[in-house]
Image (cartoon, rainbow, N blue to C red):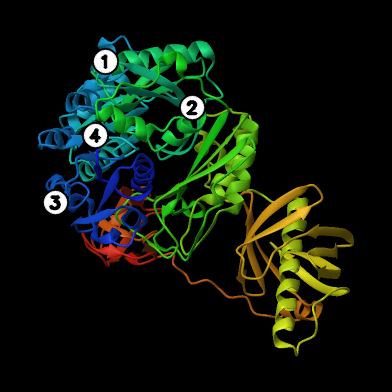
Amino acid sequence: MFKKILIANRGEIACRIIKTARRMGIATVAAYSDADKDTLHVEMADEAVLIGPAPAAQSYLNTHAILEAAQSTDADAIHPGYGFLSERQAFAEAVANMPGLTFIGPNAKAIAAVGDKIHSKKLAQSAKVSTVPGFSGVLVDEAHAKRVVGEIGYPVAVKASAGGGGKGLRIVTSEKDLMQAIRSSHNEAKAAFGDDRLFIEKFITETRHIEIQVLGDKHGHVISLGERECSIQRRHQKVIEEAPSPFVDEKMRSAMGAQAVALAKAAGYDNAGTVEFIVDKDRNFYFLEMNARLQVEHAVTELVTGLDLVELMIRAAAGEKLPLEQADVKPQGWAMESRVYAEDPFRGFLPSIGRLVRFRPPPEDRRGDVTIRIDTGVHEGEDVSIYYDPMIAKLCTHAQTREAAVETMASALDEFAIAGIRHNIPFLAAIMHHPRFCDGRLSTSFIEEEYPHGFRGRPLDNRAKRRFVATCVLAKLARTGRAAAISGTLNGPHRAGASFTAELAGEQFAIADAYLHEGVFFARINGENYSATTDWQPGQPVLHLRERHREYAMQFVRAIGGYHLSQGGMQADVTVRSVRAAELARFMAKKTPADTSKLLLCPMPGLVVSIYVDQGQQVKAGEPLATVEAMKMENVLIAERDGTIGKVNVKKGDNLALNDVILEFK
């Protein structure tokens, strides 16, 4: 067995590998860039080695630097995690060719066979695996792309041959978008994989994304560990995964597993990998790609099987035989995973960077039949960088039924407190309460269909409004009581008779007879009695409110005159004033927002990749103006109306902050 493993990755997957290695008694080395010197994986590892500057191309994609780090620390194995070099044939070969060093992953030939999307499709066809109709070759140029699309018809998927994780992937529904899609896919693929080859295949609509986890060893043994449902996606990036799938029956599971194993054997596969399928509404499934690495969503498979996939990867790489047969794989219960991203769901999911002023995930716990698991690579006080993927944590739950797993996830998301950056927790929570999701009626277009005009938050019903108002009144009473106890000069805490006026989204609420005493809260809200209990103390970011037999985790931050609250995917600003102050507030002037209609503002911090216009140029609505790259994704900024460019304020290569002015219209 290995004595020391160097981890050629960062973030949550590096921390995940360290946990297993530590349990196995194996020392670990963290490879890190300049941007990551104070991160959690560096802190957790036994040793740490700087491998280069912040840009991934100069650090986590630098094979020479990583191999030097392994040599200098006497590591005898390298685990690549996922992303970066994990599916790079040349890297696996370079590791294998270093004396005394082992690559923890599939052999280089297997990576070559399945890692290239074009070659893997041909291999799948030879192994009698059902494949998607399309062109199984590399695009030569834009004219070639037009001819290919003319043969197979729209919609099509433009894909990076070396791609994965949604990088270099564009769905195109009309000819006017084809060239821009190809340019963006080229750029993303080159930046992410160092390989800008593209291919095109038919895009099948009304589909689910279901994948099979496979595991092999160096003795020719390959098994399937069941399926994962990964249909909830945004920009072709998975957001929520679960195991098993609510759509797959036993016959389909057996058939998909058999095809996945057949493909793995045809490739000579000998470690953990995933065979991805798209499935139509009639349960026909088609091979999409094979990922020659551990998947982000491996946690849900671990929760339902009780296996540690990282440990099995390490043992397989060390030459050990798999410790189980296909008949031994008996998944139990249901697991759910939510990816917590540093992005703003209320602004088109644009990336968010900055300081994690607060990072308080719910505690990992096992309560009877329910388990909560957190995989993360950050800690409170850390900076979220522009250079890497926006995922900052994975929240996983496991229970005996899907309903219980979803309910546990919803509660855990409400407990997850993050401040300092924008994040997608409200969006994840809203999905957990969505009737269609709860019924298991999923597809890869779920988000586009259910939120066609963007995410605006889950609407509040009357009960939720009362709960939000009550929470703010309770918090005001608690703060007033604490201030009185500290100063000794203020009036005592309100125990009875306090009156306020609350406002939520323009709606007024009359509060009477409000009191809070020893955790018991009572008030009359618009004439109706409301009571609850709590153990909340001022300063805590989450308030647990117990209404009869139901408990809610209410998150809030102080704002002028009140609070900003969130719970269950719902958000609201609530002001709480004395009756007199509320009367006077009606006479306050309203602040007029600045006019930015003639400005193109940078929607997120990022790097200017391209500027497509010049001063004085006339543009039409829908034409590209600029491309800004952030967190490994390109964002093309489009003209919303016809106009003339008055001034261009930036150039290619500039780093921009949120709301920096890119250009001005006349």
Tell me the mark number nearer the camera, choosing from 3 and 2.
3
For badge 2, the amino acid type reads: Thr
Q: Residue at x 62, y 66 (%)?
A: 540
Asked whether the residues under the numbered discs 1 and 4 touch, taking CB atoms below 8 Å apart as contact, a structural biologist would say: no
Q: Residue at x 32, y 60 (%)?
A: 644
Residue annotated with mark 3? 72
Q: Residues within 10 Å of mark 3 (few under 14, many from 20)?
A: few
In which quarter of the view is residue 400 placed? top right
For badge 3, the amino acid type reads: Ser
Residue annotated with mark 4? 87
Instruction: Tell me which numbered mark, 1 or 4, is placed earlier along the sequence.
Output: 4
Asked whether the residues under the numbered discs 4 and 2 touch, taking CB atoms below 8 Å apart as contact, a structural biologist would say: no
Task: Tell which of 622 and 606 is nearer to you.
Answer: 606
- Secondary element under disc 3, as helix, strand or loop, is helix
Instruction: Tell me which numbered mark, 4 or 3, is placed earlier along the sequence.
Output: 3
Asked whether the residues under the numbered discs 4 and 3 touch, taking CB atoms below 8 Å apart as contact, a structural biologist would say: no
Task: Tell which of 71 and 187 is nearer to you.
Answer: 71
Where is residue 100 drawn, in percent x and y? 13, 37
Where is residue 482 drawn, in percent x and y? 71, 77
Q: What is the C-alpha distance between the residues marked 2 and 1?
A: 22 Å
Residue annotated with mark 2? 305
